[in-house]
Amino acid sequence: MKTYLDYKGLAVLAHRGGADESPENTLESFEYSTSVGCKFIETDVQVSSDGVPYIFHDDDLKRICNIDRKFDSLSSKEIDQLRIFGDHKIPKLIDALNEFPSTSFQIDFKTNEVVDPALKGDSRCRCF
């Protein structure tokens, strides 16, 4: 496993995937950030009610989706139907890691309940 601090010199992190330049914590924001040379992305992870880790900062959906629900009260099927910032999906953690295999991620696990499902990962992803 490669540790986050295995580098020398200054490293630029794209906070929430580059939220000032593109929709925060979306695959599109990660694509933008890597296209301009960022090798490190800081992102946040919440978990669905059925234990699927998603890239999402807030513990509720009010600010991003204008829905008065806690993130962890929705199933992955419900979350997959949501669109944020227009037409962007809320990405699953595994999809983001697989989509950007050469990018280093600083992951902020937003609750203790997110850690186990996130670290279990997926056999397609050699990330943890």
Image: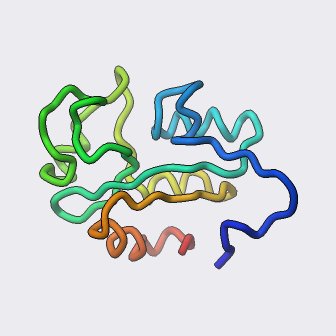
Name the residue at 16% across, 46% down. Answer: 70
8 horizontally vs 99: left or right? right
Q: Is residue 38 left or right of residue 115?
A: right
Q: Position of residue 30 (x, y in %)?
A: 57, 40
Residue 75 location, x and y as percent?
A: 15, 53
In the depicted structure, whether residue 42 falls above or below residue 53: above
Judge by depth and name the residue closer to the eye, 48 or 98: 48
Q: Quadrant of the C terminus?
A: bottom right
Name the quadrant containing residue 38: top right
Q: Residue at x 38, y 30 (%)?
A: 88
Position of 10 with respect to 56 (left or right) is right
The residue depicted at 43 percent of the width and 51 percent of the height is: 44
Identify the image's colour scheme: rainbow, by chain, secondary structure or one colour.
rainbow
- Specify whether 125 is left or right of 72: right
Q: Position of residue 58 (x, y in %)?
A: 32, 43
Q: Nearer the viewer, residue 28 or 5?
A: 5
Going 33% across and 29% down the picture, which residue do you hit? 84
Please name whichever residue, 12 or 119, is drawn nearer the observer in this view of the structure.
Answer: 12
Q: How many marks?
A: 0
Identity of the residue furthest to the right in this view: 9
- Horizontal and vertical percent position of residue 40: 67, 51
Q: Quadrant of residue 53?
A: bottom left
Q: Which residue is outermost to the top? A: 86
State the quadrant of the N terminus: bottom right
Closer to the camera in the image, 121 or 46: 46
